[in-house]
Image (cartoon, grey):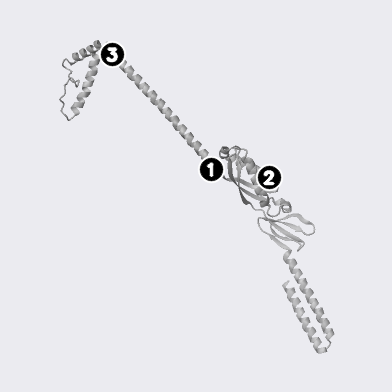
């Protein structure tokens, strides 16, 4: 194309020079002017032809990059049904115009405020990975355009999220989060399929409740902990009560047994007196102080008539009562 343009310019210059020389030498002005006009017209025609050829060569080819597809609009028949793949493709200049689509997976995020089954306000955020159906790009361009995701996804994501969240209580949204996410994914894939949009993944990225509900849940947890603490306190008091009763019952039975033993055998008291004297003697022997008390008061007189005095004292008390 560049060579043709240079050749046309060269021929145009030569023709102008030859027409000027002929008019000066021969004096025939009319013939020289006619030849000059013819040469100029020929040059303009050559330039126009070269321009048309250059424009056609430049606009007759286009390249589809990796991860993209192309559809073609024809000024005569409208959208062509063929989807063009990656690489170099051809079209008719001016009559046809290629439209390039990116068919790689892209993310879109949506955050919405909705109500649960028990009328609690929930803020839920959803992330969706989507791409257009490569075989339906002609339909997508004809009815949705190139910004199909901005036209369709926000509305259906909002509707599907609110419809699914309304089926569950606020507590179930936390305990059954996987089920909620799966139902939202199924609803979105069904709705997006009607628009020839493919969804590869749907995930709940954020789930929050109103401040009032969060405070109510915290208060409930505190109340449950207090109830459990009170329950253990009651159980401890009951066990302590049982221990006291058992101890008192044991002491009463012990006193009864001791009284029975004393009635049946007075020597039992002597034996207990000896045990008490042994303990008192150990304490006194281990003390560095001097003791000036009566041996009878300390129950240390085991050889004299202390036992007889003790038995008489016990007998006098029985007679008194």
Q: Name the residue under label 3.
A: 261
Q: Do the residues labelled 1 and 2 touch (CB within 8 Å)?
A: no
Q: How far apart are the two marked residues, 1 and 2, measured between alpha carbons?
A: 33 Å
Above or below for 52 versus 272: below
Instruction: Say what secondary structure mark 3 lies in.
Output: helix
**Dot 1 alpha-carbon crowd within 10 angstroms: few under 14, some 14 to 19, many 20 or more:** few
Mark 2 or mark 3: name the one nearer the start of the chain. Answer: 2
**Towards the viewer: 304 or 202:** 304
Q: Position of residue 306 (x, y in %)?
A: 18, 16
Q: How far apart are the two marked residues, 3 and 1, measured between alpha carbons?
A: 74 Å
Q: Mark 1 points at which residue?
A: 211
Above or below for 58 versus 104: below
Above or below for 241 versus 156: above
Q: How far apart are the two marked residues, 2 and 3, measured between alpha carbons?
A: 95 Å
Instruction: Say what secondary structure mark 1 lies in.
Output: helix
Q: Mark 2 points at which residue?
A: 191
Q: Do the residues labelled 3 and 1 touch (CB within 8 Å)?
A: no
Q: Position of residue 9 (x, y in %)?
A: 75, 77
Occupied quadrant, residue 11: bottom right
Mark 3 or mark 1: name the one nearer the start of the chain. Answer: 1
Q: Do the residues labelled 2 and 3 touch (CB within 8 Å)?
A: no
Query: Residue shown at 66%/46% (left/top)?
Result: 156
Q: Position of residue 141 (x, y in %)?
A: 72, 54
**Towards the viewer: 68 or 269:** 269
Q: How many marks?
A: 3
Instruction: Say what secondary structure mark 2 lies in.
Output: helix
> Residue 305, labelled with which disc?
none
């Amino acid at each position: 194309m560049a060579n043709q343009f240079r050749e046309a310019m060269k021929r145009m210059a030569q023709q102008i020079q030859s027409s000027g020389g002929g008019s000066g030498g021969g004096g025939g002005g009319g013939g020289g002017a006619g030849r000059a006009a013819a040469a100029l017209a020929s040059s303009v025609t050559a330039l126009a032809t070269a321009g048309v050829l250059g424009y056609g060569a430049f606009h007759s080819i286009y390249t589809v990059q990796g991860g993209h597809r192309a559809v073609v609009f024809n000024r005569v028949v409208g959208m062509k049904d063929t989807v063009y793949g990656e690489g170099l493709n051809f079209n008719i200049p001016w009559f046809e115009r290629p439209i390039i689509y990116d068919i790689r997976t892209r993310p879109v995020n949506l955050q919405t405020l909705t109500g649960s089954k028990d009328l609690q306000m929930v803020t839920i955020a959803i992330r969706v990975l989507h791409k257009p159906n490569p075989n339906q790009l002609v339909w997508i361009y004809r009815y949705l355009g190139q910004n199909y995701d901005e036209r369709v996804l926000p509305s259906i994501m909002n509707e599907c999220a609110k419809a699914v969240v309304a089926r569950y209580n606020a507590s179930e949204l936390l305990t059954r989060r996987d089920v909620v996410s799966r139902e939202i994914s199924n609803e979105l894939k069904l709705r997006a399929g009607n628009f020839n949009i493919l969804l590869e993944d749907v995930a709940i990225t954020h789930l929050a409740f109103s401040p009032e509900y969060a405070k109510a849940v915290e208060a409930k947890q505190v109340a449950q902990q207090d109830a459990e603490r009170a329950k253990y306190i009651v159980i401890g008091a009951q066990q302590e009560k049982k221990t006291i009763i058992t101890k008192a019952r044991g002491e009463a039975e012990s006193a009864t047994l001791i009284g029975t033993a004393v009635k049946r055998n007075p020597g039992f008291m002597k034996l207990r007196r000896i045990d008490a004297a042994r303990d008192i003697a150990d304490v006194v022997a281990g003390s560095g102080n001097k003791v000036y008390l009566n041996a009878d008061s300390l129950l240390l007189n085991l050889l004299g008539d202390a036992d007889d005095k003790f038995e008489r004292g016990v007998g006098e008390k029985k007679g008194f009562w």
